[in-house]
Each structure stands twice: as C-alpha cells, then as structure tokens.
Image: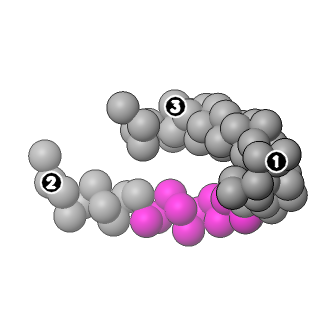
C-alpha cells in the first residue's frame, strides 16, 4: 500500500469531479438545519441522512471509503 499514491489519486478524483462536489454541497446546505433549535431538529437529521446516503453512493462508485 502506497499512501502517497493513494492520496494523489484521491486528490485527482476530487479535482476531476469538483463540479459534482460543489453541486452536492449546494444541495446539502439548501436544507434548513439549525441544530441548536429544537423546532429544526428534524431538518438537521434529514440533512445528515441525506449527506450520508449521497456520500456513500459517491464513494461506492469511485472506490473510496469514507464511512466505516
């Protein structure tokens, strides 16, 4: 295992898919989530689940594992 090579591949992947990552972040931050306020707790939970699902899907398709 060559960690340096793996990191370079990861950075290259991120650079190649920058527009997709920006679109994902726009989608996630568009969901209202004020975690300190009880009335927005469900929105906060929803954004966390949404981000996890999309991240897992992205990682599976790119051979990167972010969540154990």
Name the mark on residue 60. 3
Residue identified by numbered label 1: 40
Asked whether 36 falls inside the magenta stretch, the response is no
Asked which secondary structure carries label 2, the reply is: loop
Q: Which residue occupies the foreground of this view, 18 or 46? A: 46
Asked which secondary structure carries label 3, the reply is: helix
Relative to 21, say whether 1 is above or below. Answer: above
Find the distance from the CA under tag 1 to the CA under tag 2: 44 Å
Residue 28 position within the rendered picture, expressed as x and y whole percent measured from the top left: 76, 53
**Which contiguous range is marked in magenta?**
11-22
Asked whether 15 falls inside the magenta stretch, the response is yes
Asked which secondary structure carries label 1, the reply is: helix
Q: Which of marks 3 and 2 is nearer the N terminus?
A: 2
Find the distance from the CA under tag 3 to the CA under tag 2: 21 Å
Residue 49 position within the rendered picture, expressed as x and y whole percent measured from the top left: 67, 34
Circle 3/circle 1 CB separation < 8 Å: no
- Residue 57 sits in quarter: top right
Name the mark on residue 2. 2
The 10 Å Cα crowd at callout 1, few under 14, some 14 to 19, many 20 or more, is some
- The residue sitting at 36% across, 32% down in the picture is 68
* Residue 28 visible in the picture: no
Q: Which of marks 3 and 1 is nearer the N terminus?
A: 1
């Amino acid at each position: 295992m060559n960690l340096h090579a793996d990191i370079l591949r990861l950075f290259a992947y991120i650079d190649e898919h920058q527009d997709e990552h920006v679109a994902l972040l726009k989608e996630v931050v568009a969901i209202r989530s004020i975690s300190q306020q009880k009335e927005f707790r469900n929105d906060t939970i929803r954004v966390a689940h949404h981000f996890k699902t999309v991240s897992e899907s992205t990682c599976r398709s790119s051979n990167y594992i972010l969540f154990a």
